[in-house]
């Protein structure tokens, strides 16, 4: 765990299901150049993504494995680019909320 932080890879937000007695999910942070696409995910979909992602931040190889579960096969090098684009806290890994930003980006550029 970096810097003694106790956010468990959620970028300071409570894990899916919310914190005990807490308000559930606060909205994801807005970052310059990365507008939120498509609004918040339903809790059931967010839970599914969390199960795929796991409780710890992922590097590019881990992100590649998680993205495979979305039905996409992306090389680790491409996942490294996605990681750098969405690693808002600049840790070199991607936490769950940053992954949700990657997912929204993929939805915005994916061609059916």
Image: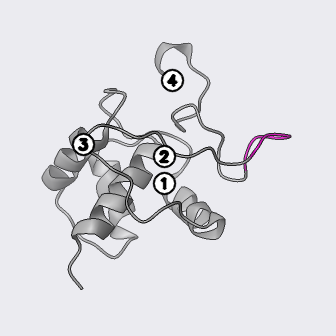
Q: Position of residue 101 (x, y in %)?
A: 38, 51
Q: For the residues carrying marks 2 and 4, which lies nearer the camera in this image?
A: 2
Local secondary structure at mark 2: helix
Mark pair 1, 2: CA separation: 7 Å
Identified at 51% across, 40% down, the residue is: 56
Residue 22 is covered by the magenta coloring: yes
Q: Earlier in the sequence, mark 4 or mark 3?
A: 4
Mark pair 3, 1: CA separation: 24 Å
Question: Magenta segment, which residues?
Answer: 18-23
Q: Earlier in the sequence, mark 2 or mark 3?
A: 3
Disc number at residue 68? none
Q: Quadrant of residue 20?
A: top right
Residue 82 is covered by the magenta coloring: no
Q: Mark 1–mark 2 contact, CB under 8 Å? A: yes
Q: Mark 2–mark 4 contact, CB under 8 Å? A: no
Q: For the residues carrying marks 3 and 1, which lies nearer the camera in this image?
A: 3
Mark pair 4, 1: CA separation: 17 Å
Local secondary structure at mark 4: loop
Q: For the residues carrying marks 1 and 2, which lies nearer the camera in this image?
A: 2
Q: For the residues carrying marks 2 and 3, which lies nearer the camera in this image?
A: 3
Q: Earlier in the sequence, mark 2 or mark 4?
A: 4
Q: Position of residue 29 (x, y in %)?
A: 46, 39
For label 2, the residue is: 96
Q: Position of residue 5 (x, y in %)?
A: 56, 19
With 24 as the anchor, is 7 left or right in this view? left
Residue farthest to the left? 77
For label 4, the residue is: 1
For label 1, the residue is: 53
With 3 as the anchor, is 87 left or right in this view? left
Pick the quarter of the image with the C terminus: bottom left
């Amino acid at each position: 765990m970096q810097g003694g932080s106790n956010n468990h890879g959620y970028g300071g937000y409570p894990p899916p299901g919310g914190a005990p007695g807490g308000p559930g999910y606060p909205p994801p942070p807005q970052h310059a150049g990365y507008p939120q696409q498509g609004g918040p995910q339903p809790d059931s979909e967010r839970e599914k993504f969390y199960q795929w992602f796991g409780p710890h931040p992922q590097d590019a190889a881990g992100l590649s494995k998680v993205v495979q579960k979305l039905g996409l096969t992306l090389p680790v090098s491409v996942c490294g680019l996605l990681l750098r684009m969405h690693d808002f806290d600049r840790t070199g890994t991607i936490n769950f909320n940053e992954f949700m930003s990657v997912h929204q980006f993929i939805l915005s550029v994916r061609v059916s």
